[in-house]
Amino acid sequence: MGSLPLSIDILPDDAEALSLEEAAVRLRVSTGRIRTLIRDHNLLAASRGGQPVIPVAFFGPDGLAKHFEGLVTILLDGGYTRDEALEWLFEEQDDLALRPADALHTHSAREVIRRAQAQAF
């Protein structure tokens, strides 16, 4: 089993996270599929206490948050590294009073995508 691309010491302590097994249950897929999503950069994961975790903010009621995959693609295609993308997703935007990862669940989701497009290029 190959190693996963994990961001280390980037996820804020207050960010709730799921283990790979919990994420698999939430998405109704296998743990192997979760690992593939992480390796293919369709899902970002971090290391906490030496274990891979996925932020709960990336999930919606029926799977991944509606705009999550598109937002990650914009950031990575725009030159952000995985670590930079994860860090950006959890930096509070003062004028929104939200972190982009949290804004994915609000009416500000499209604004976050616009900002990612502007910053990435």
Image: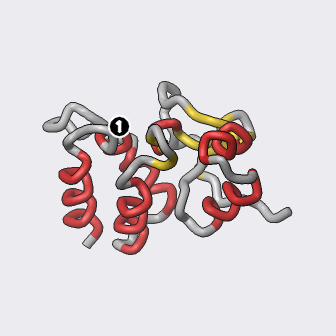
Q: Residue sitting at 75 percent across and 51 percent down? A: 31
Residue 78, above or below 18: below
- Foreground residue, 68 or 96? 68
Counting the numbered discs, the total is 1
Query: Residue 98's image quarter?
Result: top left
| Residue 113 x/y as whole percent | 26, 57
Viewport quadrant of the N terminus: bottom right
**Residue drawn at (20%, 43%), measured in percent from left and top?**
108
The residue that mark 1 highlights is 102
Residue 20 location, x and y as percent?
Answer: 70, 44
Give the residue furthest to the right.
1
Q: Is residue 78 above or below residue 82?
A: below
Dot 1: few (<14), some (14–19), or many (≥20) neighbours within 10 Å? many
Expressed as whole percent of the image width and height from the top left, the position of residue 37 reads: 61, 62
* Quarter of the figure with the C terminus: bottom left
Q: Is residue 14 left or right of residue 121?
A: right
For the point 48% across and 33% down, the residue is 12
Q: Foreground: 95 or 110?
A: 110
| Coloration mode | secondary structure
Left or right position of 65 against 44: left
- Residue at x-position 61% and y-position 40%: 26
Q: Position of residue 89 (x, y in %)?
A: 38, 47
Under mark 1, the amino acid is Asp
Q: Secondary structure at mark 1?
A: helix
Q: Quadrant of residue 54?
A: top right
In the picture, measured across the screen, residue 121 lies left or right of residue 70, that is left
